[in-house]
Image: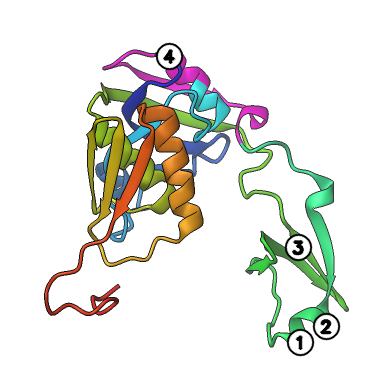
Amino acid sequence: MKDGDFVSVDYVGRIKGTDEIFDLTLEDVAKKENVFNPKIKYKPVTLIVGGGFILRGLDDALREMKVGERKTFEVAPDKAFGEKRDDMMKHIPAARFKEQNINPFPGAVINVGELRGRIVSVDGGRVKVDFNHPLAGKTLVYDLEVKAMVENAEERVKSIVFYFTGLDEVDAKVADGAAEVTILKDVDVVRPVKSMVAENVMKWCGVGKVMFVETFEHGEKPGSAEK
């Protein structure tokens, strides 16, 4: 594989030492390991080699693989979510939680500004919160299979839309150096997200223009569909 290749993959990601699954694309494995979530659509995902969308350790592994190959490998923290940092452990006055009618307790996940953290302890008037990524400091083990190269331009565009929005109810057309994206679900995708989608579609799909299309049918009121 080389940078810029779009590849469809299946994988199971585990934490070394505990064998706990933190991410996967295979429904049968999810059911077997009792981590099945009916809200998730289990299917192969499309990745861009060297695109900066995945862990550096995954990128390194993909560069050495070919279609049809399956590989199990470890990803050290420095090529995954980094080492745990002491400066990401914060002490917050309990009074701040009381002001927002929040009862802090160990294990609770909270948001402070743009940071997401887990409460480690509550001691007197202080609450200790860990803002490190939950997988920081962990060595990961991946079982990865390269299913196919994704050559179709429309499928490439849709994979980028999915990465930034999580939406697979999307139609895409690519012609004359432009990409046209239609979100088929009644969801309002905000402009900053559209901008990121457009930037990456232009970078990785070889087009110079990206258009987002909204369609309204006769008798339909904007926002009337169930979201």
Locate residue 180, reporting x and y percent: 27, 44
Identify residue type, mark 1.
Glu
Magenta region: 60-80
Please identify, in this view, whether the residue under mark 4 or under mark 3 is nearer the observer.
Answer: 4
Residue 55 lies in what quarter of the image? top right
Q: Do the residues labelled 3 and 2 touch (CB within 8 Å)?
A: no
Q: Which of 49 and 131 is in front in this view?
A: 49
In the rendered image of this protein, does residue 24 appear above or below residue 112? above
Instruction: Say which element carries label 3.
Output: strand
Q: Look at label 3 and name its amino acid.
A: Val
Q: Which of 173 and 19 is in front in this view?
A: 173
Marked residue nearer the N-terminal end (3 or 2): 2
Task: State yes or no: residue 62 in magenta.
Answer: yes
Q: What element carries label 4?
A: loop
Q: Can you say whether 89 is above or below 163 in the image?
A: below
Q: What residue type is labelled 2?
A: Ala
CB contact under 8 Å: marks 1 and 4 = no
